[in-house]
Image: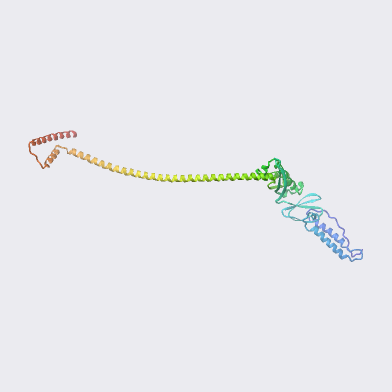
Amino acid sequence: MDSNQPRPVTPQPPQGGGGSSGSGFSEILSVFLSFIAIFAMPPQGNGGGGFSAILTVFLSFIAIFAMIVIPSSSTIRNGFSILHQVPEGHVGVYWRGGALLKTITDPGFHLKLPFITHYEPVQVTLQTDQVRDIPCGTKGGVMINFEKIEVVNRLHKDYVHDTLLNYGVQYDNTWIYDKIHHEINQFCSSHSLQQVYIDVFDQIDEKMKDALQGDCTRYAPGIEIISVRVTKPKIPESIRRNFEQMEEERTKVLIAIEKQRVVEKEAETNKKMAISEAEKVANVSKILMEQKLMEKDSVRKQQEIENQIYMAREKSLADADFYRLLKEAEANKLKLTPQFLELKFIEAIADNTKIFFGEKIPNMFLDQRLLGNFLQQLSRNVSEEEK
């Protein structure tokens, strides 16, 4: 062997390696360098093929490097790749020799041993699983079909290892797809078509959510059921037409009821308006009546005041007249003396302009004597009363 020829390097087997450790890359690189050294040796013959051998080795190295180092997105190349990428919203889980490792990686680039370590990205954000074509039989024996049921769920990061260890990467087949089929059939078998299609259809979402979450909490606590959306099931055409006719008749009845309610409301409104108008008129009349009564009462009180004033004035005048007459009577009583009466008698006779003569004259003097007697008697009576 020519001393100028390079010595072949014997490949050394790797001394272990981890799922995401950096030592795996250096081990694989040393193996590649050994292969390059072997393929780069010139042939033992006459020569001339050195350049082609180098080119072949170089292209082989590039191909192997691209396969192993460049991150892959396909499952086939996943086993050959050293560098792999975990997308955002996922975590990386690893198997070595079919055994699930406890290593969980976050989003980003990571290293692994090719051919030995297998990895899968597992979503830990919200995801929607669509379960399609779910046949079920109702309590009455009618077959119906739910075209699509959507289940919004999430796998918590802390429970990824336990969930995959017990149920595998396709854990949602067990706890969502198969479970939805089971729960829908259980629900349909205990309800009639009328209930499933119309009466309790709005409750199916919550019932499915509670049923799924109950079993997941018990057996797979890492799975959280956010919501369930159930589409209207398909029913036989003849039954569907009957339901449509029933719904149409029900709609007509509801329309008639609503029209009746509108008429009743209008009548009630008109009644209330009439009552309000009558009350308003009554209130106005009452106010006017009260106003008139107040005016009459004011006039009455004014008249009473005037009457009281008039009565007080008349009473005062009457009292004054009475007092005057009383005083005059007292004064006259004091004047009734024989001398005063005789004086008045004389004054009365003196005022006469005519004097009669004849046979009756003595009678007149006789009358004067009688008057004198009367005056004397009156004078005695007054004296006795004073005593």
Image coords of residue 42 (percent x, y): 89, 64
Q: Is residue 375 above or below residue 105?
A: above
Q: Quadrant of residue 35?
A: bottom right
Q: Is residue 314 left or right of residue 366?
A: right
- Extreme residue in the left direction: 358
Residue at 26% x, 42% y is 317
Picture coordinates of residue 324 (x, y %)?
23, 41
**Residue 325 image point, x, y percent:** 22, 40
Q: Is residue 5 left or right of residue 198?
A: right
Please say if 222 is above or below 339. Answer: below
Residue 51's quadrant in the figure? bottom right
Q: Quadrant of residue 217?
A: top right
Quarter of the image that includes the N terminus: bottom right
295 or 227: which is nearer to us?
Answer: 295
Q: Residue at x 32, y 44 (%)?
A: 306
Depth check, front residue: 114 or 185 = 185
- Compared across the picture, whether 13 is left or right of 84 comes to right
Residue 142 is situated, as x and y percent measured from the top left of the image, at 71, 42
The total of numbered circles placed on residues is 0
Q: Nearer the viewer, residue 280 or 210?
A: 280
Q: Nearer the viewer, residue 220 or 100?
A: 220
The answer to whether residue 387 is seen in the rendering is: no
Query: Residue 50, can we see it?
Result: yes
Taking 195 as reference, is 71 above or below it? below
Q: Quadrant of the C terminus?
A: top left
Residue at x-position 47% and y-position 46%: 277
Tell me which residue sits at (19%, 34%) in the image: 385
